[in-house]
Image (cartoon, grey):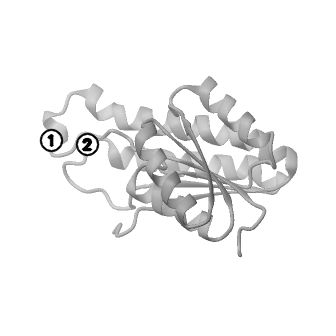
Amino acid sequence: MLLETKTAIVYGAGGAIGSAVARAYAREGATVHLAGRTRSTLDEVAQRIRHDGGVAHVTQVDVLDRAAVERHADDVAAGRGVDICFNATSNDDVQGTPLLAMPFEEFLRPVTKAVTAHFNVAVAVGRHMTRSGRGVILVMAGGREAIPRLGGSHVAWAALAGLCRQLAAEFGPYGVRVSWLLSPGSP
């Protein structure tokens, strides 16, 4: 198995993409830590993983709460460390409204949430990964192309790409890789 003896944290593990990634990691032998806001959906994913013979742990974590994310990363790292972190948390974007009609607060919300969530997660796990000299941080974000009526989503994705480049520059010398992944089907 490709990920045997590895520990993975999946933030946003209750969603469609996060749950699929968590199940794939478990199938490949990783011990998977499922994190997200909604306990019931995380429990469903964990049950499926366990039913298929995998190992899954569930923690309800709000990625906007930096202290909670730090505690969670510390708890996970206290075991065998953290090898993989996949962040598929959503940005709460407002879709369908043209920018000309959108209040600034609605435009800014996905940008602020995306940058805050991904910064909190990357820094929390990055502390452990840089100390151990290994790890991969994967950030799930949108596409390359701007699409009309997606509010601040494209700006949030661009900000995440910049954040990933900065994290890669700072964490890379310590053996930690950081990568930004486009959503499936992105133009």
Q: Nearer the viewer, residue 116 or 41?
A: 41
Viewport quadrant of the N terminus: bottom right
Q: What amino acid type should be assigned to the residue bearing mark 2?
A: Gly
Badge 2 crowding class, 10 Å Cα cut-off, few under 14, some 14 to 19, many 20 or more, is many
From the top left corner, tell me how far across and down residue 58 is, in percent: 57, 43
Q: Where 5 falls versus 132 (above or below)?
A: below
* 41 relative to 132 in the view: left or right: left
Disc ID at residue 73? none
Q: What amino acid type should be assigned to the residue bearing mark 1?
A: Thr
From the top left corner, tell me how far across and down residue 178 is, in percent: 66, 55
2 or 1: tag closer to the N-terminus: 1
Badge 1 crowding class, 10 Å Cα cut-off, few under 14, some 14 to 19, many 20 or more, is some
Mark 2 touching mark 1, by CB under 8 A? yes
Q: Where 11 falls versus 84 (above or below)?
A: above
Please give the name of the residue rendered at 43% of the width and 32% of the height, measured from the top-left corner. Answer: 112
Residue carrying label 1: 97
Which element type, helix, strand or loop, lies under badge 2?
loop
From the top left corner, tell me how far across and down residue 104 is, in percent: 26, 28
* 25 relative to 181 in the view: left or right: right
* 36 relative to 3 in the view: left or right: left
Q: Quadrant of residue 75?
A: top right
Mark yes or no: residue 181 visible.
Answer: yes
Disc ID at residue 151? 2
Viewport quadrant of the C terminus: bottom left
Q: How many marks?
A: 2
Q: CA distance from mark 2 to mark 1?
A: 7 Å
* Residue that protrudes farthest toward the right in the picture: 132
Which element type, helix, strand or loop, lies under badge 1?
loop
Please give the name of the residue rendered at 74% of the width and 55% of the height, measured from the top-left corner. Answer: 83
Mark yes or no: residue 140 visible.
Answer: no
Please give the name of the residue rendered at 26% of the width and 31% of the height, measured from the top-left corner. Answer: 106
